[in-house]
Image: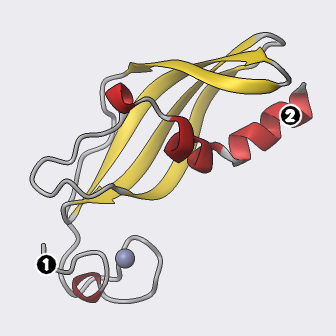
Amino acid sequence: MRSRYTAFTLQRMDYVDATWHADFRPADPGKGDSPRWLELAVIDSKPGTRSAQVEFEARYLAGGRVNAVHERSSFCFEQDRWWYTQGEQLPPTFVPWKPARNEACPCGSGAKFKRCCGRGS
Ligand SMILES: [Zn+2]
């Protein structure tokens, strides 16, 4: 269980993208393009054999701003794999910020923000 859970945690960003229910996806008012995921911090986890909970903060870049989702996700184990069932949105702990145009892009590309994810914003 533990190793499976760890693997699952490491794959979380793909998992978020692939299976996140539309109702829980962060909205991106103004642009409508999907956010670029930057970083995932697992804050707390309650592993179990049939169900598990993970509290996380996932940072993303959208509309020229860095923002974050803070959520407690619930999962169940069925048919040999974990399934995301639902997420409870938690109060944000992260203050959104806008990188300066000449700052290194927060996506880690090494390019300046204005020449990378900040283009057109
Ligand atoms: Zn970038």
**Picture layout, residue 71 above or below residue 3:** above
Give the side of residue 112 with respect to residue 82, left or right. Answer: left
**Helix, strand or loop under label 2:** helix
Which is more N-terminal, label 2 or label 1? 2
Q: Quadrant of ligand 1?
A: bottom left
**Picture layout, residue 67 above or below residue 72:** below
Percent coordinates x, y for residue 37 in the rendering: 44, 56
Which amino acid, mark 2?
Answer: Arg
Residue at x 19%, y 61% (from the top left corner): 63
Determine crowd level at label 1: few under 14, some 14-19, many 20+ residues with C-alpha closer than 10 A: few
Give the side of residue 30 with respect to residue 72, left or right. Answer: left
**Picture layout, residue 34 above or below residue 70:** below
**Helix, strand or loop under label 1:** loop
Determine crowd level at label 2: few under 14, some 14-19, many 20+ residues with C-alpha closer than 10 A: few
Residue that protrudes farthest toward the top in the picture: 50
Percent coordinates x, y for residue 27 in the rendering: 23, 41
Which amino acid, mark 1?
Answer: Gly
Mark 2 — residue? 4
Would the CB of label 1 be found within 8 Å of ligand 1? no
Q: Nearer the viewer, residue 41 or 84?
A: 84
Residue that protrudes farthest toward the front in the picture: 79
Res. 120 mark: 1
Res. 13 mark: none
Give the side of residue 73 with respect to residue 65, left or right. Answer: right
Residue at x 27%, y 82% (from the top left corner): 103
Residue at x 82%, y 19% (from the top left corner): 79
